[in-house]
């Protein structure tokens, strides 16, 4: 094993050298081949009768009528226009050029191109050394801490608009969460547990509800069945709360069920206006289960405290969770920015600030906004109502558009309540992009912005929503090229049709 391992780097080094030599020599081989072809054509010009062939071609072109050139340029314009339409559609749907993708994927390896996969996972540090890029953890999909109720909220939206607010991918992730969360002790699985395991996997909502009732018939104390009915069958928050209370009485000592049910009961209280009760329930839950920080219950607490305008309590929660050693979220970063903006925004004036400069408090607020925007650059357009909101998904991608939708959906009202906060955000948020290094190999306060967010957000968000993309992608070369080609050939076709004699003289002059 040691010999094989030690010899492996040498063989790999030889292979890499061979590939690099072939890639280096390919350009020169092509140049030599092209020169040889030109030389052969020159030597064989008499046997091939090239002069006679050129003369015949010139005579043939002189006999062509303007109608031929109209048809030629019109056909070229039509074909390039169809290519342009397809390229534009493909770019809007997948974020890349089809021709460019095919060229890179299939033609580049044939031409000896170097694969870029070995460098995509690295970025340069300040001292120029390569460091691992944490793209995997950055692109992990998380459960939305404030996700809505399917029956009482998502389904009502569908009834009114006829649109589905949740994607199948999002609902499938939720089904997997429920299966994992409510499995319980696999050594003592009961018949009703087996029914519920199948129920979470059902794609049809009515089939899930029927399975829940079937589980209740087997055991009237099946807490998971009441959870499913509260989530999906209840058409009001009040009805959902009643079913969750029934589930709580049947949960026993199952910690997963207890945490899930108590959290949803706290969210029911928040939605029904009993905010102080909701805050108490969330605090008790966090004290009872302090090790379940991964569930992000503190984000529910922050939103409820903001509704109470208990800003000192909000600051206390941030002091605990806005720590350098803990993972960040849009809720943490933007709530911190909101508190600092609220302290100065009421009297903030861009004109006065430009004359006298920013005070220390104003500078702290601006830096907090820049920090929040760097973490998630999609949020400001929703808070400033430059982009329309939709119902948030059940899962979010941190730093992605899905997280921005979820944050703005619940926190826009809190920003509006703080007088002048949105004005300060409007004046300062775009300044963030002058701080972040470009291209985005390096971050400023956070890791470089991950490149996988667009793909994941398109899976999580419904098709009628226009996904926000950062950084904005420039139009691919082939779209610009086909647009120019289509316009040029269309112009030629029109000129040839309108001025056939003049264009005929022009073509003959060019050909001769």
Image (cartoon, rainbow, N blue to C red):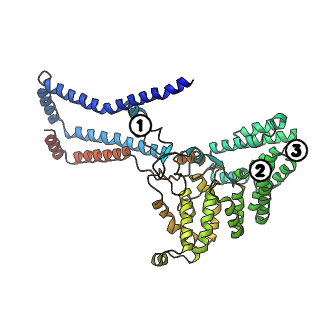
Q: Earlier in the sequence, mark 3 or mark 2?
A: 3
Residue designated by label 2: 260
The image quadrant that residue 217 belongs to is: top right
| Gap in angstroms between the C-alphas marked 3 and 2 | 17 Å
Residue designated by label 3: 221
Label 2 neighbour load within 10 Å: few <14, some 14-19, many 20+ = some
Q: Residue at x 17, y 35 (%)?
A: 61
Secondary structure under badge 1?
Answer: helix
451 w.r.t. 341: above or below: above
Residue designated by label 1: 104
Q: Quadrant of the C terminus?
A: top left
| Gap in angstroms between the C-alphas marked 3 and 1 | 59 Å
* Between 316 and 456, the one nearer to me in the picture: 316
Residue 357 as seen in the image, left or right of residue 262: left
Select label 3 or label 2 by which is in front: 2
Secondary structure under badge 2?
Answer: helix
């Amino acid at each position: 094993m040691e010999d094989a391992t030690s010899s492996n780097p040498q063989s790999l080094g030889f292979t890499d050298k061979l590939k690099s030599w072939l890639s280096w020599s390919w350009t020169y081989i092509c140049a030599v081949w092209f020169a040889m072809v030109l030389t052969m054509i020159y030597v064989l010009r008499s046997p091939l009768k090239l002069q006679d062939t050129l003369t015949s071609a010139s005579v043939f072109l002189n006999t062509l009528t303007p109608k031929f050139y109209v048809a030629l340029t019109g056909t070229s314009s039509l074909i390039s226009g169809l290519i342009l339409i397809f390229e534009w559609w493909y770019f809007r749907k997948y974020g890349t050029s089809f021709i460019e993708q095919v060229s890179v994927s299939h033609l580049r390896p044939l031409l000896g191109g170097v694969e870029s996969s070995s460098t995509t996972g690295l970025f340069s540090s300040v001292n120029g050394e390569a460091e691992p890029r944490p793209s995997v953890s950055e692109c992990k999909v998380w459960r939305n801490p404030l996700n809505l109720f399917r029956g009482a909220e998502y389904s009502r939206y569908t009834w009114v608009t006829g649109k589905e607010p949740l994607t199948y991918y999002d609902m499938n992730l939720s089904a997997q969460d429920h299966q994992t969360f409510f499995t319980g002790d696999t050594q003592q699985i009961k018949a009703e547990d087996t029914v519920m395991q199948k129920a979470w996997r059902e794609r049809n909502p009515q089939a899930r509800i029927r399975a829940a009732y079937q589980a209740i018939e087997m055991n009237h104390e099946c807490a998971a069945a009441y959870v499913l009915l509260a989530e999906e069958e209840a058409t009001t928050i009040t009805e959902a709360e009643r079913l969750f209370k029934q589930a709580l009485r049947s949960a026993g000592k199952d910690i997963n069920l207890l945490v899930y049910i108590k959290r949803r009961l706290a969210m029911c209280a928040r939605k029904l206006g009993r905010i102080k009760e909701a805050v108490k329930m969330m605090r008790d839950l966090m004290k009872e289960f302090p090790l379940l920080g991964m569930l992000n219950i503190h984000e529910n607490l922050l939103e409820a405290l903001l509704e109470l305008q208990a800003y000192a309590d909000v600051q206390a929660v941030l002091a605990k969770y806005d720590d350098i050693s803990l993972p960040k979220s849009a809720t943490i970063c933007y709530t911190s920015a909101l508190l600092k903006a609220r302290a100065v925004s009421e009297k903030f004036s861009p004109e006065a600030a430009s004359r006298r400069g920013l005070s220390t408090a104003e500078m702290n607020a601006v830096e907090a906004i820049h920090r929040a925007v760097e973490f998630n650059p999609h949020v400001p357009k929703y808070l400033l109502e430059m982009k329309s909101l939709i119902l948030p998904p059940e899962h979010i991608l941190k730093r992605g558009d899905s997280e921005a939708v979820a944050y703005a959906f619940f926190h826009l009202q809190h920003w509006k309540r703080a007088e002048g906060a949105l004005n300060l955000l409007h004046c300062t948020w775009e300044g963030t992009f002058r701080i972040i290094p470009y291209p985005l190999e390096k971050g400023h306060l956070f890791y470089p912005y991950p490149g996988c967010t667009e793909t994941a957000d398109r899976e999580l968000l419904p098709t009628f929503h226009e996904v926000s993309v950062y950084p904005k992608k420039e139009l691919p070369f082939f779209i610009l090229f086909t647009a120019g080609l289509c316009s040029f050939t269309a112009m030629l076709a029109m000129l040839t049709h309108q001025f056939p004699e003049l264009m005929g003289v022009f073509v003959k002059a060019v050909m001769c």
